[in-house]
Image: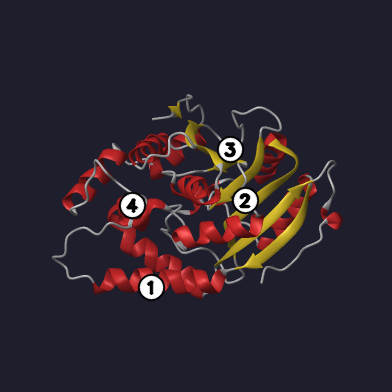
Amino acid sequence: MSFNESKPDSGYEAALNDHYGMPDLGDEILDALDAAGKDIDALTRDDIASFDEFHIRGRDATREVAEIAGIGDRDRVLDVGCGIGGPARTLAAEFDCDVVGVDVVEEYCRAAALFTDRVGLTDEVRFQHGNALDLPFEDEAFDVVWFEHTLMNIEAKEVVFEEARRVLRPGGTLALYEICAGSGGDTVFPVPWASDASLSNLVKPERLQELVMDIGFDEFAWQDVTEPSLEWFRDVVESMQSRPPDAPQPLGLNLLMGSETPVKAMNVVQNLEEERIGVIQGIYERVSLPSGRSSGTATDIQ
């Protein structure tokens, strides 16, 4: 397994590890897979697909954003906030990339390395425990920096985008698939990324665009994908509610969210329905000098 450790050194990191970091997560998931009749010594990506990507619309969303961004041809990709590694494995397996995943949650990094080893992708994907505010990589080391449901917990987004720009080569791609604040009022908690407002740092979509472009990126593509996100999460909730009370534990996002999974899922649906949150995709190019918000030329994604 390829997983490098660094020491967490802030209250912010500790809070995120408390929220997301279930003890022995990888082993717990292996036990659930074994109980469900999976051969844990010969796992495939399809065996873990139902929980592998901890974001709205799962693997389909990763494929969609990667296609829009034009990822491939041995691109070197940095997945910031990689979780248990699902998007990194999808990008490596389906888009011919070399991927480095970085996450502040140590248990996620351990589980990511474990499952990458189990599905035979250690040559293409490795993981590093680290903070998005201080990425442990050299300047201009990557062709693509990838954020997929990562920014919701981060207040200092300007610092994150400065770091993303620093580690991107000139002309490199910044890919975003993120939850934003909506116009319908405060977020209803708990939700998957936060039990209360102390860990939730959403901004409006237009503010997110401003922040990215002020750091030195030009906008290539942007789309609001709230509607398909709502449809997807409605299906998730319906599936949960239709399960018999005595049914065995499903192989789903409950493995990552724990006992509060039903209420968190229902709250996401409510937040989407009431426009308290929204979901966006954005693709940006690193330009040679900070461009300011006026230099971006957006192209709507069809």
Marks 2 and 1, Cα distance to the nearest angstrom?
29 Å
Viewer-nearest residue: 119 or 210? 119
Dot 3: element? loop
**Mark closest to the chain's N terminus, 4 or 3:** 4
Residue 66 seen in the figure: yes
Marks 2 and 4, Cα distance to the nearest angstrom?
23 Å
From the image, state whether disc 1 or disc 3 is nearer to you.
1
Residue 155 seen in the figure: no
Disc 1 marks a residue whose amino acid type is Asp
Q: Residue at x 70, y 29 (%)?
A: 139
- Residue indicated by mark 3: 132
Dot 1: element? helix
Left or right relative to 286: residue 99: left
Q: Residue at x 30, y 51 (%)?
A: 255
Label placed on residue 48: 4
Q: Residue at x 72, y 53 (%)?
A: 284
- Residue indicated by mark 1: 235
**Mark closest to the chain's N terminus, 2 or 4:** 4
Disc 2 marks a residue whose amino acid type is Ile
- Residue indicated by mark 2: 71
Left or right relative to 48: residue 28: left
Q: Is the C terminus in the top left, top right, bottom left or bottom right quadrant?
A: bottom right
How many C-alpha atoms fall within 10 Å of the one at disc 1: few (<14), some, or many (≥20)? few
Disc 4 marks a residue whose amino acid type is Ile
Marks 2 and 3, Cα distance to the nearest angstrom?
21 Å
From the image, state whether disc 1 or disc 4 is nearer to you.
4
Q: Position of residue 32 (x, y in %)?
A: 22, 49
Dot 4: element? helix
Q: Are marks 2 and 4 in contact (CB under 8 Å)?
A: no
